[in-house]
C-alpha cells in the first residue's frame, strides 16, 4: 500500500509539567499531539485517510513549511492558530543540575505563580509577566514577527487586548485613566531560569544591555496600548510608535544571575502623545534593602496615529492620584515644554557666541587637516573613530503593526555604539546611559538601513572615570530613488573600568574637522549641559 506523503502538521504544544493546561480554539482537525514512542505509522494508510488529508490541506489558504523529511512522512510547521492560555510557569526543568534559586527578598512574592497574559487592560492586580514563559512555547503563534523571550510574552499579552477591541470608527469618547490602570511589570527569573539567563548573558558574563533596552521599548509599547484601551472595548484602532527616549540612566550595575523586574506606567499625556516611565529593579545579596534595588530609570515618549488615516489621534487623558504620580506628571510636563523650546531655538540663527565656540572647537581639527605632523598626539579626529554597518530590514523584524520593531533598532544601534567605543578605548566599555533617542521616520520591511556611529566627544575631567559620548545615525537608503533619509538618532555614554585606568589606559580627546561636525558636538553638549572646557581637558 502506498505510503502517505501529504502535509502533516507537527505537534503544536508539549506541556512542560503536569499542572500545565491549555485551551485551543480554531484547531486544525489533524493537530493532535503524537508521542515519539508511538507507531511509525501516524495515520492509517487507507484511502479514506488520504482523501481526508487531500480535502483538508489542499483547500487551505495557508501552506505550512517542511521541517523534516522521512521515508514514511513529511512533517511540517504548524499553521498559526489563535489560542488563550492560563497556566503556572515553572522553568526548573530548564536549569542545569545543581542550580539553586536566588533568594531575592524583593521579588520572592511574585516568583511562585505568574501568568503570561494580561487578562484585561483594566486589571489592576495582574501579576508580573514571566519573561521566560515564551521560550517554552511555539514561536509561530504570536501576532508580532520579531521574536525574543520578552517581546513574545508582551505581544501575547497585547494580543488578548486586540481580540476585545471593537470595530467602531465613529467612537470619539475618551476616558480619563489613572497611572495605576496602565501599570505593568515583567519578571526575569535569572536566578532559576537557565535558558532565559543564557539569552541575556554577554561574553563578559554580564547583562546584554542592548537586549534590555530592546525589552524596555517593547514593555513601554504594551503600557501605551493598555492606556489607550477603553472600558467598553470600542477603542479606535491606533498605531502607537516610539517618538523619543529621554535619559536612560544606569544607577547601579545589573547582574545576569539575579532576578530582575521592570515596572512601568503612563505618567503624562498630551493630545496625541504620552510619556511612560520604566524602572528596572534588582535585589542582590550585597544590596537587599529596597532603597538599593533601583538600577535604571527610562522615559519613553509614544505618539498615537489613526490606523486608517495616518493622522495624529487623541488618546485617553490621565489623572494622577498619589503624590508620587503628581510629581512624575509635573516632571514629564516640564520635559515636554523643554523639548518644544529646544525645537524653537534650533530654528534661530546662530549667535555670535556660538560662532566663537565653533571656532574654538575647530582650532585643533584645522591643525590635524593642515599640519598633521604638529597635531596633538593625545587627540583624534571624529572621522577617524567612525564605524558603520548596513542591512536589509527583514519581515522577521517587524512588530504587530507591520513596521520594523523600534526596540530592534535600539539594540542594533547600542551594539554598534558599544563596538565603536571598544575600538576607540581599547578595552571593553561600561554602559552609563542612553542620553537621547529620536525616531524621525518609520522603518519599513525591505528598507536598506545604514547605521553610522562615531565618538562625538570625551569628558576627561575625572581621570578615574572618563566618559565617552557616542552618536549613531540611522539612514533609510533607497537606491532605486537615489535617496537617503535620517530615520533615527541615538546618543549613548560609556566609560571604562577603573582598573584599566589604573593600569595606565589613557582616553584621547576627540575633535571635529568640519563645521558640520562641530555643530553636532555643540548641540549634544548643550542638550547634556556639558561645558566646552571638558572637551579641552
Image (cartoon, rainbow, N blue to C red):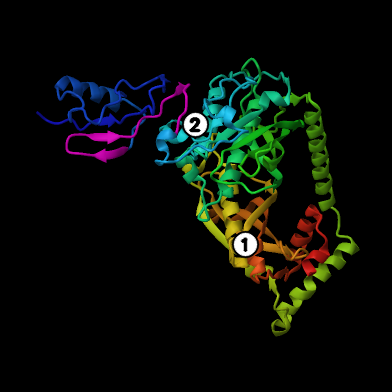
State which mark lies toward you, 1 or 2: 1
Rendering coords of residue 114 (x, y %): 53, 26
Residue 123 or residue 255, whichever sits in front: 255
Q: Is the magenta stretch mostly helix, strand or loop?
A: loop
Magenta residue span = 66-91
Q: Which mark, by number, is residue 143?
A: 2
Check residue 88 for magenta coloring. Answer: yes
Q: Where is residue 423 in the image (x, y as percent from the top left)?
A: 58, 66
- Label 1, secondary structure: give it: helix
On the question of residue 128 being in view, the answer is no
Q: Quadrant of the N terminus?
A: top left
**Residues packed near mark 2 inside 10 Å, few (<14), some (14 to 19) or many (20 plus):** some
Farthest residue toward the right?
352
- Identify which residue, 434 or 15, lies in the foreground: 15
Can you identify the residue that label 1 sits on? Answer: 421
Q: Which disc is residue 262 wearing?
A: none
- Position of the C terminus by quadrant: bottom right
Q: Where residue 219 appears, x then y in whole percent?
A: 61, 35
The outermost residue toward the bottom is 373
* Residue 503 picture quarter: bottom right
User: Going by the image, does 258 lie left or right of 302?
Assistant: left
Amino acid at each position: 500500500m502506498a505510503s502517505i506523503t501529504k502535509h502533516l502538521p507537527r505537534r503544536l504544544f508539549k506541556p512542560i509539567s503536569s499542572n500545565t493546561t491549555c485551551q485551543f480554539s480554531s484547531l486544525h482537525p489533524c493537530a493532535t499531539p503524537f508521542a515519539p514512542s508511538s507507531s511509525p505509522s501516524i495515520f492509517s494508510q487507507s484511502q479514506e485517510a488520504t482523501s481526508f488529508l487531500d480535502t483538508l490541506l489542499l483547500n487551505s489558504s495557508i501552506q505550512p513549511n517542511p521541517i523534516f523529511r522521512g521515508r514514511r512522512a513529511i512533517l511540517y510547521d504548524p499553521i498559526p492558530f489563535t489560542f488563550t492560555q492560563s497556566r503556572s510557569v515553572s522553568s526548573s526543568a530548564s536549569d542545569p543540575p545543581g542550580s539553586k534559586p536566588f533568594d531575592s527578598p524583593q521579588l520572592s512574592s511574585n516568583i511562585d505563580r505568574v501568568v503570561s497574559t494580561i487578562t484585561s487592560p483594566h486589571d489592576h492586580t495582574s501579576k508580573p509577566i514571566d519573561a521566560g514563559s515564551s521560550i517554552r512555547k511555539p514561536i509561530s503563534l504570536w501576532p508580532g514577527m520579531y521574536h525574543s523571550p520578552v517581546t513574545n510574552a508582551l505581544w501575547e499579552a497585547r494580543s488578548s487586548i486586540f481580540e476585545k477591541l471593537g470595530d467602531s470608527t465613529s467612537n470619539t469618547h475618551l476616558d480619563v485613566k489613572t497611572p495605576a490602570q496602565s501599570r505593568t511589570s515583567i519578571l526575569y527569573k535569572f536566578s532559576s531560569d537557565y535558558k532565559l539567563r543564557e539569552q541575556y548573558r554577554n561574553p563578559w558574563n554580564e547583562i546584554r544591555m542592548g537586549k534590555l533596552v530592546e525589552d524596555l521599548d517593547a514593555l513601554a509599547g504594551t503600557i501605551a496600548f493598555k492606556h489607550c484601551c477603553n472600558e467598553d472595548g470600542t477603542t479606535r484602532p491606533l498605531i502607537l510608535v516610539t517618538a523619543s527616549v529621554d535619559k536612560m540612566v544606569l544607577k547601579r550595575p545589573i547582574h545576569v544571575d539575579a532576578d530582575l523586574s521592570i515596572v512601568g506606567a503612563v505618567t503624562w499625556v498630551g493630545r496625541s502623545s504620552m510619556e511612560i516611565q520604566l524602572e528596572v529593579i534588582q535585589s542582590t545579596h550585597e544590596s537587599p534593602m529596597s532603597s538599593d534595588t533601583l538600577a535604571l530609570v527610562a522615559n519613553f515618549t509614544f505618539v498615537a496615529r489613526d490606523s486608517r488615516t495616518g493622522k495624529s489621534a487623541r488618546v485617553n487623558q490621565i489623572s494622577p492620584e498619589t503624590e508620587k504620580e503628581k510629581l512624575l506628571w509635573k516632571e514629564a510636563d516640564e520635559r515636554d515644554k523643554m523639548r518644544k523650546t529646544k525645537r524653537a531655538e534650533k530654528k534661530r540663527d546662530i549667535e555670535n557666541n556660538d560662532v566663537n565656540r565653533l571656532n574654538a572647537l575647530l582650532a585643533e581639527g584645522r591643525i590635524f587637516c593642515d599640519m598633521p605632523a604638529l597635531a596633538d598626539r593625545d587627540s583624534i579626529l571624529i572621522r577617524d573613530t567612525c564605524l558603520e554597518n548596513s542591512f536589509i530590514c527583514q519581515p522577521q523584524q517587524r512588530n504587530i503593526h507591520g513596521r520594523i520593531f523600534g526596540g530592534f533598532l535600539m539594540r542594533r544601534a547600542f551594539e554598534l555604539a558599544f563596538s565603536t567605543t571598544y575600538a576607540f578605548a581599547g578595552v571593553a566599555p561600561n554602559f552609563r546611559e542612553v542620553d537621547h533617542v529620536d525616531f524621525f521616520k518609520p522603518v519599513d520591511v525591505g528598507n536598506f538601513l545604514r547605521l553610522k556611529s562615531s565618538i562625538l566627544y570625551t569628558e576627561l575631567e575625572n581621570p578615574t572615570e572618563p566618559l565617552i559620548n557616542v552618536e549613531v545615525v540611522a539612514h533609510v537608503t533607497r537606491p532605486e530613488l537615489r535617496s537617503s533619509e535620517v530615520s533615527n538618532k541615538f546618543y549613548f555614554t560609556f566609560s571604562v573600568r577603573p582598573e584599566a585606568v589604573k593600569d595606565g589606559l589613557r582616553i584621547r580627546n576627540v575633535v571635529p574637522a568640519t563645521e558640520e561636525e562641530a555643530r553636532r558636538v555643540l548641540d549634544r553638549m548643550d542638550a547634556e549641559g556639558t561645558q566646552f572646557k571638558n572637551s579641552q581637558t
